[in-house]
Image (spheres, helix red, strand yellow):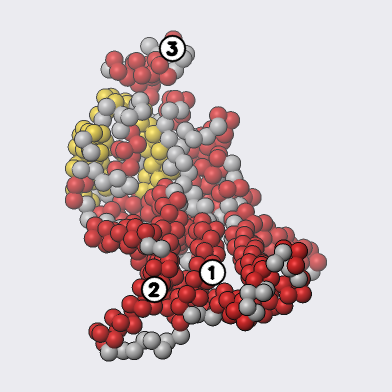
């Protein structure tokens, strides 16, 4: 469904991504793990052109795109098929929860307003916020805002949803409400790529775990393998630091 | 003359006498705001854009305007502009109403002020919302027009209010070229009464500007809170409640 080869990205003289290959199949829930600064977020942002990669190749739905020279049409093609959930929610502060969802449907998908509202209500219902549709982001808690962010993404019915640390900005007691929505979305067969530090989500929901460090993919495998028998020393030491319950790892 | 000699009846008399001359103040303020908004927008675009020449010009213009005393620019415009027009196009500007010269002078300053206000308001809208919009199917210009600019506009209201108050006050310098606004009128009255009412005249004038500033300040605060998203949300919810109660009544 989505395949990338040899993505490279520099910020100034910092080499952030040093040739990333990744392939994502329909229905996959790919979790990307790694220490901060390893390039996880940059990789995710390159996948839908929030950042432009220096070079690399992308194949999406049979369309080949040279990432170093992607045209506006290429970018629109990919953006149309992907949705992004941000760490800081990035809801439109001048729009209500409902409008946050309909905006992309009406303008991006050219949906009729009534149909967009109907679609948006279904999405908001799915994230459990039907009763908050007329609230502005400033009136919602962080967890609620992020759920609106997820509703905004799923309403467009994209082929892939990219999640960039969706729970990192949340208070601990609000994390679970977002994770449970994400589990629900995953269980419906949505293809997802998730950058997160939530190990329980990676362990229980992911179909594939990718471990990144210093701009390269160190290791990728099923969560069962990654969490019990990682092949690489770097993966092991990272997981050991994160999961205090170390006797579970190996 | 002693401060205790100030007569209330004179204060009121002069105060009422000056009020009609506020129409002149209104004229040059409106002209300066119109010039400031139109050209300030272009300048702000230059400052935010990538074109180095436009950026340099816009920043240079602001730096120069910041350095020139208002009265110097007023004299340049009032004495210089007709000379230039006479020399270049053989057009005689000397018989034009002086209020235009004051308006243009203030407008030239206001371009610099408005461009800074617009630039900083635009930048204060979190870039993430723009990113969310373009990744949600909006084009770049849709994202700016529908998401960023409405918020930037609201953020700019208090600063625009301050700019207008500054213009009102700076305009009183127009008396130096013989403009009869409330300040010019005060000078006339002062001359007519051989400076016998000097305290009453200028205290009345100060009170007039004080009240004007208070009213404007209130107006802008009201506009600001009227446009705040939480008050809009309350309106929506009351409208909704109203609809429901109507339905119940029916």
Residue farthest front in this picture: B1
Residue A49 lies, in percent from the top left, at 30, 48
Residue name at image x 67 percent, y 73 percent: B197
Under circle 2, the secondary element is: helix
Instruction: Determine whether A228 is above or below A110 in the image.
Output: above
- Find the residue positioned furthest to the top: A247
Q: Which residue is mark 2?
A: B75
For disc 1, the chain is: B
From the viewer's perspective, is A28 left or right of B3?
left
Image coordinates for residue A122, horizontal then vertical, percent? 55, 52
The circle on residue B168 is 1
> Is A128 placed left or right of B3 in the picture?
left
Q: Which mark is residue A131?
A: none
**The N terminus of chain B lies in quadrant:** bottom right
How far separated are the C-alphas under marks 2 and 1?
18 Å
Residue pointed to by mark 3? A246
Q: Secondary structure at mark 1?
A: helix
Closer to the camera: disc 2 or disc 1? 2
**Given the image, what chain letter belongs to the residue carrying mark 2?**
B
Q: Residue at x 45, y 78 (%)?
A: B177
Can you give x and y, in whole percent of width and height, for residue B28 in the image?
A: 49, 76
């Amino acid at each position: 469904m989505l395949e990338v080869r040899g993505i490279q990205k520099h910020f100034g003289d910092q080499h952030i991504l040093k040739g990333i290959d990744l392939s994502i199949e329909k229905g996959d829930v790919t979790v990307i793990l790694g220490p901060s600064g390893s390039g996880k977020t940059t990789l995710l942002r390159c996948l839908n052109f929030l950042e432009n990669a220096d070079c690399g190749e992308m194949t999406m739905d049979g369309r080949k795109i040279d990432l170093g020279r992607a045209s506006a049409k290429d970018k629109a093609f990919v953006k149309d098929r992907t949705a992004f959930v941000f760490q800081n929610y990035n809801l439109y502060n001048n729009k209500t929860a409902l409008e946050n969802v309909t905006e992309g449907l009406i303008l991006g998908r050219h949906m009729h307003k009534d149909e967009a509202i109907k679609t948006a209500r279904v999405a908001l219902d799915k994230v459990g916020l039907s009763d908050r549709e007329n609230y502005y982001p400033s009136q919602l808690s962080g967890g609620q805002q992020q759920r609106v962010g997820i509703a905004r993404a799923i309403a467009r019915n994209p082929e892939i949803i990219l999640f960039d640390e969706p729970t990192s900005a949340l208070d601990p007691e609000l994390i679970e409400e977002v994770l449970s929505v994400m589990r629900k979305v995953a269980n419906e067969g949505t293809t997802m790529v998730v950058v997160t530090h939530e190990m329980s989500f990676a362990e229980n929901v992911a179909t594939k775990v990718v471990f990144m460090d210093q701009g390269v993919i160190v290791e990728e495998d099923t969560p069962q393998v990654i969490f019990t028998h990682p092949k690489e020393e770097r993966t092991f030491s990272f997981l050991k630091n994160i999961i205090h319950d170390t006797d579970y790892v190996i | 003359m002693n401060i205790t000699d100030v007569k209330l009846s004179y204060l009121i008399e002069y105060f009422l006498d000056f009020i009609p001359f506020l129409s002149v103040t209104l004229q040059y303020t409106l002209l300066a705001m119109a010039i400031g908004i139109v050209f300030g927008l272009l300048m702000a675009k230059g400052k935010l854009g990538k074109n180095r020449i436009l950026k340099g010009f816009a920043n240079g213009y602001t730096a120069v305007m910041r350095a020139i005393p208002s009265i110097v620019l007023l004299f340049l415009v009032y004495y210089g502009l007709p000379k230039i027009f006479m020399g270049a196009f053989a057009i005689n500007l000397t018989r034009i109403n002086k209020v235009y010269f004051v308006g243009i002078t203030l407008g030239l300053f206001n371009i610099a002020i408005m461009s800074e206000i617009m630039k900083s308001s635009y930048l204060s809208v979190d870039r993430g919302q723009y990113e969310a919009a373009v990744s949600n199917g909006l084009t770049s210009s849709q994202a700016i027009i529908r998401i960023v600019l409405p918020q930037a506009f609201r953020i700019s209201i208090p600063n625009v209010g301050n700019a207008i108050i500054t213009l009102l006050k700076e305009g009183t310098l127009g008396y130096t070229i013989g403009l009869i606004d409330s300040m010019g009128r005060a000078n006339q009255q002062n001359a007519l009464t051989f400076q016998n009412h000097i305290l009453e005249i200028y205290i009345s004038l100060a009170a007039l500007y004080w009240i004007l500033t208070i009213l404007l300040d209130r107006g802008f605060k009201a506009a600001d809170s009227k446009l705040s998203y939480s008050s809009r949300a309350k309106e929506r919810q009351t409208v909704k409640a109203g609809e429901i109660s109507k339905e119940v009544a029916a």
